[in-house]
Image (cartoon, helix red, strand yellow):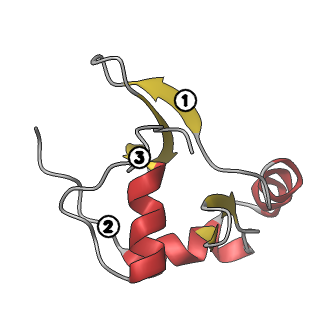
């Protein structure tokens, strides 16, 4: 298994809101400093701000997980949730119930 990508937790917290009660991850609104233009900021905020993060993706072993692209790199959503919630990057983490999309 390849080593997980290093996560900048403060950067993740600027992009996402994590709800520990539901386990859901939501896109935060972007400000102009995070976008290439005012149009890009408005477009992102109208389409994605406050919506659930992640699309389903199979890992080739019959397991499906939520993933998201950040700065052109794909990340597993459950790893981001853990990092945002605990402030630590997990070495290995998976779903205790075996459901990779919750």
Q: Where residue 94 sits in the image (x, y, percent)?
A: 33, 49
| Occupied quadrant, residue 50 | bottom right
Reply above or below: 80 against 43: below
CA–CA distance between discs 1 and 2?
A: 21 Å
First-in-chain label (2 vs 3): 2
CA–CA distance between discs 2 and 3?
A: 11 Å
Left or right relative to 31: residue 4: left
Q: Please name the residue that numbered disc 3 is placed on.
A: 76
State the residue in front, 41 or 17.
17
Disc 1 element: strand
For the residues bearing labels 1 and 2, Cβ distance under 8 angstroms: no
Q: Which residue is at 59% across, 34% downward?
A: 55
Give the crowd class for mark 1: few <14, some 14-19, many >=20 residues within 10 Å.
some
Disc 3 element: strand
Asked if residue 36 shows in the view, the reply is no
CA–CA distance between discs 1 and 3?
A: 10 Å
Q: Please name the residue that numbered disc 1 is placed on.
A: 56
Q: Where residue 88 sits in the image (x, y, percent)?
A: 30, 78
State the residue in front, 95 or 53.
95
Reply above or below: 40 against 74: below
Numbered tag placed on residue 99 in the rendering: none
Q: Which residue is at 61% across, 70% downward?
A: 18
Q: Please name the residue that numbered disc 2 is placed on.
A: 7
Q: Which residue is at 83% across, 55% downward?
A: 39
First-in-chain label (1 vs 2): 2
First-in-chain label (1 vs 3): 1
Left or right relative to 70: residue 46: right
Asked if residue 68 shows in the view, the reply is yes
């Amino acid at each position: 298994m390849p080593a997980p990508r290093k996560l900048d937790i403060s950067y993740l917290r600027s992009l996402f809101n994590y709800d520990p009660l539901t386990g859901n991850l939501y896109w935060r609104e972007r400000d102009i400093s995070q976008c290439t233009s005012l149009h890009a900021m408005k477009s992102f905020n109208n389409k994605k701000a406050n919506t659930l993060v992640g699309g389903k993706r199979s890992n080739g072993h019959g397991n499906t997980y939520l993933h998201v692209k950040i700065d052109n790199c794909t990340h597993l959503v459950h790893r981001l949730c853990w990092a945002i919630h605990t402030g630590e990057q997990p070495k290995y983490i998976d779903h205790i119930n075996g459901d990779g999309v919750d």
